[in-house]
Amino acid sequence: MEIYQIGGQFYDSNIYLIKSKRSIIIDTGTGSRHERVIKNLEAYINPKDIDTIILTHRHFDHTGGAESMKRALDAEIIIHESASEALRSGDEVTTAALAFGKSFPKLDVSAIKEGDIIDCGDMHLKVLHTPGHSICSIVLYDSETKTLFSGDTVYTDGGIGRWDLPTGNYKELVASLKRLTEMDVDTLYPGHGPSAKGDGNRHIALGLKSARLWG
Ligand SMILES: [Zn+2]
């Protein structure tokens, strides 16, 4: 099992490839660098070998590229159940597509929920619903390797997701961060910025600390 970052420049979210028995993509960026992202992907894997794209939440910088990536990979898109209707109906407001000056296409998505396990073969990613940055935010955790994909809930070095966009909520964000501090995390792969190897817990604790400064 290998993990690669295949995108994440400018406004794009980080895009991760988990290459395993069942290979998956986590987040898709805005889609504005679609061809570059696919090229990066092809350096590691045949795009046809990917069957699932997981979106950590609905925001355009994570989901804008989902439609073109779905077409290129012929893959299923999954997102937390609280966002599936918004994506199916092409909601431009809560996805923040309008804030990027873009429209949002109607997307065919499947819903996942708290406690679901995404079995990649070598990794078993548990879905944890962590609202706050957005109502549909999830993180994905593999307890065996102590790896956490944290979306926009927490970044490295005390960075946390903003809570002032539609469906954001400060109190929920603090509760979600607190929940993450109770987990054992070595490697942290956030939705933006650098990842952390070996000291994920420290970065999550810093995130909770900085969130509480706003309370
Ligand atoms: Zn976001």
Image (spheres, rainbow, N blue to C red):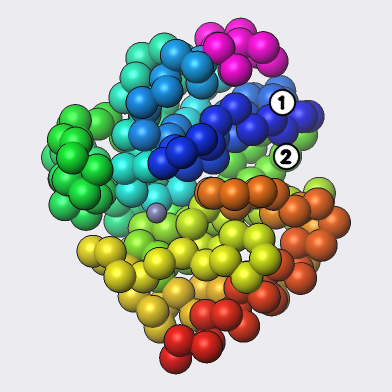
Q: Residues within 10 Å of mark 2 (few under 14, many from 20)?
A: many
Q: Position of residue 34 (x, y in %)?
A: 42, 20
Asked if one can make out residue 115 in the rendered structure from this viewpoint, the answer is no
Instruction: Determine whether, in the image, residue 194 is placed left or right of residue 72.
Output: right
- SS state under label 2: loop
Q: In which of the image's four quarters is ligand 1 placed?
A: bottom left
Q: Tell me the number on the disc at residue 123.
A: 2
Q: Nearer the viewer, residue 179 or 199?
A: 199
Spatial CA distance of label 2 from label 1 is 8 Å
Please tell me which residue is depicted at 30% across the width and 70% down the height of the picture.
164
Asked whether 43 falls inside the magenta stretch, the response is yes
- Image coordinates of residue 80 in percent, x first then y, are 39, 51
Query: Which residue lies under the disc numbered 1?
Result: 20
Q: Residues within 10 Å of mark 1 (few under 14, many from 20)?
A: some
Position of 150 with respect to 188 (left or right) is left
- Is mark 2 in CB contact (under 8 Å) with mark 1? yes
Please state the horizontal and vertical placement of residue 8, each as a whole percent of the image.
53, 36
Q: Which residues are magenta?
A: 39-48
